[in-house]
Image (cartoon, rainbow, N blue to C red):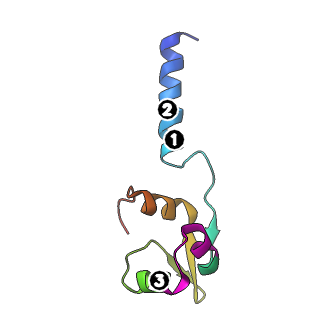
Amino acid sequence: MTSYEIKMLAEEVYKLFESNQLFPDRFMGIAEASKYTTIPVSTLYQLVSKNKIPYCKKCGRLIFSERKLCQWINGTLEDL
């Protein structure tokens, strides 16, 4: 492998790492999302009610994607 090929491969791996696509997504409930983000549960409920944080609702439960929460925290989430 040439040094150019190694550089290109390293850049691709870096892009995947930055976009969190190297690791599978993990889902969590509100209590775990609160611990993960250090945001109180009551504040998370407020953010959800205002559609200001990424979430989905399944069977009456709020579900949060670790990947989307990380992007939201870093300001890199494109759309809610």
The majority secondary structure of the magenta stretch comes to: helix
Locate residue 67, reporting x and y percent. Answer: 54, 59
Give SS at disc 3: helix
Task: Name the residue carrying label 3.
Answer: 43
Mark number displayed over residue 12: 2
Magenta residues, as a range? 32-43
Q: Residue furthest bottom?
A: 60
Residue shown at 38% from the left, 79% from the top: 51
Locate residue 22, reporting x and y percent. Answer: 59, 45
Residue 11, placed above or below residue 40: above
Residue 29, placed above or below residue 70: below
Task: Name the residue carrying label 1.
Answer: 16
Magenta residue check for 41: yes
Locate residue 62, reporting x and y percent. Answer: 56, 82
Give SS at disc 2: helix
Q: Nearer the viewer, mark 3 or mark 1?
A: 3
Residue shown at 59% from the left, 67% from the top: 36
Which comes before the other along the chain, label 3 or label 1? Answer: 1
Q: Residue furthest top?
A: 2
Locate residue 28, reporting x and y percent. Answer: 63, 72
Q: Is residue 32 left or right of residue 7?
A: right
Residue shown at 61% from the left, 72% from the top: 35
Task: Tell me which amino acid carries mark 3.
Answer: Thr
Dots 2, 1 in contact, CB < 8 A: yes
